Image (tube, coloured by chain):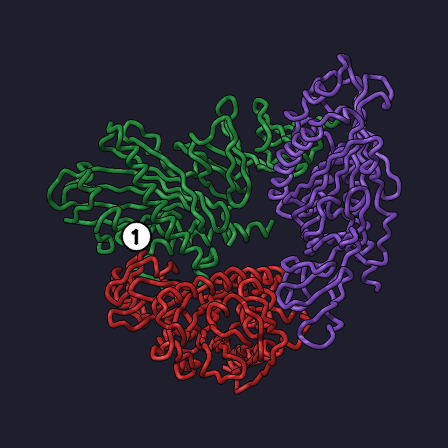
Chain colours: A purple, B green, C red
Amino acid sequence: MPFLKNAWYAAAWADEVRDVFLTRRILDEPVLMFRRENGSVVALADRCPHRFVPLSMGRRRGDVVECIYHGLQFDGAGACVHNPHGGAPPKSARVRTFPLVEKYRALWIWMGDPPLADPSRIPDFSFLTDEAHFTTITATSRFDANYELITDNLLDLTHVSYLHAASFGPTDIARSELEVRENGTTIHCNRLCRNDLSRPPIRNALVHHEGAVDFWLDMRWDPPANLRFDIGVTPAGRPRSEGLHSMEPHLITPETAISSHYFWGDSRDYMREDPGLSKRYIELLRAVFDGEDKTLIEAQQRTMGTPDLMALGPVLLKCDGGAIRAREILSSLIAGEEEASKVR
Amino acid sequence: MPFLKNAWYAAAWADEVRDVFLTRRILDEPVLMFRRENGSVVALADRCPHRFVPLSMGRRRGDVVECIYHGLQFDGAGACVHNPHGGAPPKSARVRTFPLVEKYRALWIWMGDPPLADPSRIPDFSFLTDEAHFTTITATSRFDANYELITDNLLDLTHVSYLHAASFGPTDIARSELEVRENGTTIHCNRLCRNDLSRPPIRNALVHHEGAVDFWLDMRWDPPANLRFDIGVTPAGRPRSEGLHSMEPHLITPETAISSHYFWGDSRDYMREDPGLSKRYIELLRAVFDGEDKTLIEAQQRTMGTPDLMALGPVLLKCDGGAIRAREILSSLIAGEEEASKVR
Amino acid sequence: MPFLKNAWYAAAWADEVRDVFLTRRILDEPVLMFRRENGSVVALADRCPHRFVPLSMGRRRGDVVECIYHGLQFDGAGACVHNPHGGAPPKSARVRTFPLVEKYRALWIWMGDPPLADPSRIPDFSFLTDEAHFTTITATSRFDANYELITDNLLDLTHVSYLHAASFGPTDIARSELEVRENGTTIHCNRLCRNDLSRPPIRNALVHHEGAVDFWLDMRWDPPANLRFDIGVTPAGRPRSEGLHSMEPHLITPETAISSHYFWGDSRDYMREDPGLSKRYIELLRAVFDGEDKTLIEAQQRTMGTPDLMALGPVLLKCDGGAIRAREILSSLIAGEEEASKVR
């Protein structure tokens, strides 16, 4: 299945891109990112149009990139601004550029038609920059698996009770109330676990309340694979405002058909000044995401032997509802894009 | 060339499969094996029908396998016996099972049509359990080569004089008498070396006889690739009953078209109580099979660049007679199976 | 694109091939080379026609190669001269041989039609054996890249100013005078840099002259990829005979479509008796060729994702003139060969 081209994908966390080059393969294209001297960000195809060597092997001269092989220089708009070999740079000597927008602590890239790149279509992740209410950590992983397998994982959190039983304790999420709602191309999969009496270690560490708790797990998905996770816990029956509350970004970007970048984080509204908690959270979440989810999903990808889950005719369960709808919406958007490209 | 499906393949030595999971790829299918609490053995496809993760990443709950991803539970017959996500398990939630029979110290798997799986068709390897007459060792190797190349190797033992000259000494097997016989789909390649005066180190270690010896090398092949090797030595002219005698299993099972499991062993009727001889035999045979045959056959496979030897038009010699007949019989059985599957 | 078959390729430096076997994949064929007892050289396909194992795993018996698997023996002309399995060797038991000629310190192989192999068509590299005038070093590299990318690199030396700026200093070769001449299928790309005042470290080490220098970089290409580099420096305006002068072989031979053998060296007419200079030159040139060119060209090959540069529509610059002509000549020779093979 082709990728959705006209969509915003997370390309990096903003603090990953500085004056030195950062390169990432995105939708199977090599992309070179850097920050201009004025702080604005640039994304270029990481491939010189002359001899196809990676521009990232070259050097910056101010805001211009010089190819290491024969010295052609390109500006951030992809134009060749210097040809040391005589004559004006050929018109065809252009490097493809990609719209790249800094918003919500992330850099968002548009791999499709540049005029269509409207930053207002980036889904709301404003909690990431809401320093008045949240303390935020961010991190990056890489999975050798198709990106939709990671979406599936996030849209069916019942797996927490099995795959993460040792890390997050014995909570039985499969028995919680699930509400799936759609709003345009946005999907909400919300779970509410009432009167939970389990005491997984992580809850003991955070919740100083002996009795039952309510907790919620609200996942919002926007195509192609940008998810917002709203999770919290209160004493049973109390309003959410009295509880502990985290908002999490889970932004998945295809590297290739069978590998993905995974940008994740956590914004918490509690114990905000604990100097060690942010560090422990990154360690805990990396142990879970890279140690458990990544290991499993990469094995799943190898066992599947194809990026296309649906082609294998999976058995469907109630808990798959949200993930299947997300796959249908994405598939329909991609089909529409394919159709439109044929018309042109 | 496709694999022969309706046939017994060795999947493991019986003592390799205990209560923990053993996984092997067999005929390019991932297979999960374990032993039920009552000691009986089970073989399942190592792939959950829900999300295609390896069931072997999960856990046993008694005789039931629980998938680590979303908690579906399957019994040894492949039926889903527990669905924690509400409702009865879907009918389609079945894992493929494979007939698996424990016989002659080995587990035999049937990758074809289960109703056709008749254990009486397993070739006779009863010496492996004949503890009254034999002391037996077994071991397992894995070759990155097509299984028929290993059959070829075993059906033409003249290679011993060249490939194993350093390990087994200068015996000239190429000059021995060769008899090739067929019996249904069974092939016998028997060699008799009379009045041999060579003194390879292994013979010196075993045979306390100064003069010439007779030795025999009798290989029996049954399709797809189950071989029994009957080897022994006597003082020249004496009956076999007076000599030293070993029976060996050489059971080859395709992992993929270009890799194979190789289950081998040795059952000897002499020096049975020598505490160190069994250990030395395993070391010696592994040095020969993995150090010499495996190295050569893997190089052969790489040089061929295809699993199909005959497609390359090999030069044929007298010593190839048995191996070529085995290839013809197997090829004809596979063609018949393909034909039958078209009719259905 | 297929390889040019009827052409001389460097297979090895003469001193690489002694009595022990040397194996190299050349034009995607496994080749076994050795030196007969009388010193003459032999190239055989490294593949027994019986079971397709590498002959190089076997042993020499005089000038005969014995296969390690079943003992067939082949002479240097590829004929089977011993079959230990009874009967005369089958007529079909022949190993392909390749014309192999020792000339100019190198071994030249002909992978095409043997009757067409005329050693007088080997381009002139006589400086390599001209011990009266030159002190010569030789070495071998291996690049994971198509051979034409290495030709491109050598036919456009402007890259020295960028890729090798740190190693060879700031000389601006892009501004030098370039002359491209053709003579039959031979191309000459000659550059002359007049009145150069740069003082790269290597020049300081060699040229004891404070003022401006002239230097020349004369590259000669013969298909498929045999290049001779004539490089030297004089005080500005003085004749070449007064300067320092090196002649270099750059012989590229396809291993596969995306990997190459690279035989290089240097024959200098100055400081010939310096005991350490030869050693330092090998180290310096290996650091440059393997550390800079190889790293870049392998990244270029990976970024291209195909062996065929022209299929990607590269932007062409003035400095590409020689390389593009070489590609055109080679392409036309290959097309002619393809056409001729259809006629037959």
- Per the image, label 1 sits on a secondary structure element best described as helix
Q: Quadrant of residue C175?
A: bottom right
Left or right: residue C4 versus residue C302 is left
User: Where A341 sits versus B297, above or below?
Assistant: below
Left or right: residue C256 versus residue B298 is right
Image coords of residue A281 (percent x, y): 69, 30
Q: Quadrant of residue B300?
A: bottom left
User: Where C326 sits versus C63, above or below?
Assistant: below
Residue named by callout 1: B163
Left or right: residue C214 versus residue A178 is left
Left or right: residue B293 versus residue A186 is left
Q: Quadrant of the C terminus of chain A?
A: bottom right
Q: Chain of mark 1?
A: B
Image coords of residue B89 (percent x, y): 70, 29
Residue lying at the far left of the rendered structure:
B211
User: Where B168 sits versus C183, above or below?
Assistant: above
Does any portion of residue C33 appear in the rendered image?
yes
Between C105 and C9, the one lying in front of the other is C105
Residue lying at the far top of the rendered structure:
A210
Mark 1, residues whose alpha carbon is within 10 Å: few (<14), some, or many (≥20)? Answer: many
Residue occupying the point 68% across, 54% down: A28
Between B301 and B230, the one lying in front of the other is B301
Image coords of residue B182 (percent x, y): 34, 50
User: Where C15 sits versus A275, above or below?
Assistant: below
